[in-house]
Image (cartoon, helix red, strand yellow):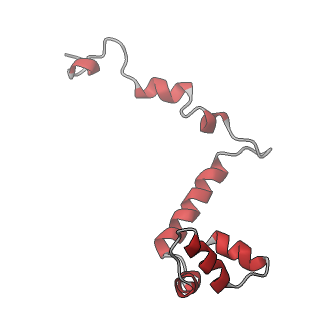
Amino acid sequence: MGFIDSMRGKGFAVETICAVLREQGVQVAARTYRSWSRLSPAARTVSDAVVVDAIRSSRIDEHGRPTPESLYAATQDDRAAASPRPGSGALHGRPADA
């Protein structure tokens, strides 16, 4: 749809654009394009976009640069907390006091 929209912006008619696309092997009818362009996005798509925007904005510092945590996944403290302590028995499925 983006291609057809950009060509329409240059003054070409939808029917002409679709005819050229059909010659190139892309089967799209002008009627199909028009029905797609009138559809509104699904509610799930909109809510997902809100969540993605929130995550992306939380990964940027006050100067507009990505935070180190977003570039390198977890911090050293997060990795240490997630890994079992040596001698804890966690590797063998035993409680630490056993």
Let me know if residue 90 appears in the view.
Answer: yes
Picture quarter with the C terminus = top left
* Placement of 29 over or under 71, stated as above or below: below
Residue furthest out toward the top: 87
Q: How many marks?
A: 0
Q: Is residue 15 left or right of residue 97?
A: right
Q: Position of residue 64 (x, y in %)?
A: 77, 46
Q: Position of residue 16 (x, y in %)?
A: 66, 82
Residue toward you, 68 or 9: 9
Residue toward you, 76 or 4: 4
Q: Residue at x 51, y 69 (%)?
A: 45
Q: Position of residue 44 (x, y in %)?
A: 47, 70
Let me know if residue 96 appears in the view.
Answer: no
Residue toward you, 45 or 77: 45
Q: Quadrant of residue 84?
A: top left
* Placement of 65 over or under 81, stated as above or below: below
Q: Quadrant of residue 69?
A: top right
Residue furthest out toward the front: 23
Residue toward you, 44 or 41: 41
Q: Is residue 86 left or right of residue 81?
A: left
* Placement of 75 over or under 89, stated as above or below: below
Q: Residue at x 65, y 70 (%)?
A: 2
* Placement of 93 over or under 38, stated as above or below: above
Q: Residue at x 50, y 74 (%)?
A: 27
Q: Position of residue 37 (x, y in %)?
A: 59, 82
Picture quarter with the N terminus = bottom right
